Amino acid sequence: MPPSISAFRSVNRLVLRPPLRASTMSTQLAVAVAVAGIGAYALYNNRQGASSSDKPIFSSFGFRSLRLHSTELINHNTKRLRFELPDPSQPSGLSLTSALLTVSFPNGRWLPVLRPYTPTNDLNEPGFVELMVKLYPGGKQSTHIHSLKPGDTLTFAPIKELAWTPNKHQHVALIAGGAGITPMYQLLTGILNNPEDKTRVTLVWGVNSDEDIFLGDEFSALEKKFPGRFKAVYVVSSPDARSPHAKGHVTRQVLEKAGLSASLEKNLDTKVLVCGPPPMEKALKGTKSFVGGAKGGVLAELGYTPDQIYSF
């Protein structure tokens, strides 16, 4: 079974965190070497069996290198990158809510840099997989990926998250912050483009500026195509002078205004999915404590129970 995104985030923190003492350094080195070894072994096995397999490339776990086909700057800090699949007639093999772990060794590093990204193109599209990658100041992986040019390669491995079942819930609330919008976009389009899935979707997206709403046109088109089934709400911390969007952050008041109170009859069977910066997720989900003093978050105040909430 492919590892989850959260598992790789834990490994990533170990690999990238600056060592404070020898024992810590040894632990980090062991993890990094293990990850690199697994990747090399998987790459070797993939190359040995690639010619005899007619399955989509990411239908099973393994590390694969893909060639970059094209890049497009879609706002001031986000690029759309399209990578070529080895068989132009096959889709990626990824299931809905899957992500891709990226592995690189930028600037001659011998320790790998790991970062999960969620594909944003139609998962049934043959020949390509597409990422939208935000450039973070000092971000090792985002800086490396933004430096790639057509013809360059990047190594990937598939990782799964929430297994989505059509019509399991009457309504799903997607609450995203910043670049956390990509798994929401993948799930949203997967739901709405499936004629058998009748799930209603509400999206609340918090961003820093109006320019950060880089999927605004796509969401607007989906609202028009699926009236009554999909609604998008934006909240901007530093909006333009003529911004049509609310100023602030994703708060209880914003969610209530978006119609996401759990007490409403239409929300009795609602699944809430969250993806954003740690401070935002902490505010929404609250804090846990094994000793006591746990604090509920905004979603608990709205009436949602822990089993209704999932974080990517």
Image: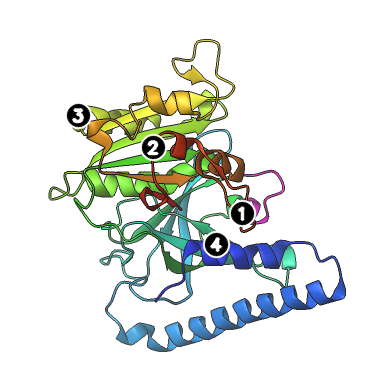
Give the crowd class for mark 1: few <14, some 14-19, many >=20 residues within 10 Å.
few
Residue to which mark 2 is pinned = 303
> In this view of the protein, which residue sits in the foreground, 157 or 197?
197
**Residue 263: in sight, yes or no?**
yes
Estimate the spatial distance between the alpha carbons at disc 1 and disc 3, rounded to whole Å: 40 Å
- Position of residue 74 relative to residue 210, above or below, is below
Determine the residue positioned at 16% across, 44% down: 198
The tag earlier along the polypeptide, 3 or 4, is: 4
Range of residues picked out in magenta: 135-143
- Position of residue 33 relative to residue 147, above or below, is below
Give percent across and percent down for residue 26. Answer: 78, 78
Give the crowd class for mark 2: few <14, some 14-19, many >=20 residues within 10 Å.
some
Residue to which mark 1 is pinned = 289
Q: Residue furthest right?
A: 21
The tag earlier along the polypeptide, 1 or 4, is: 4
Residue to which mark 3 is pinned = 228
Q: Nearer the viewer, mark 4 or mark 2?
A: 2
Q: Nearer the viewer, mark 1 or mark 3?
A: 1
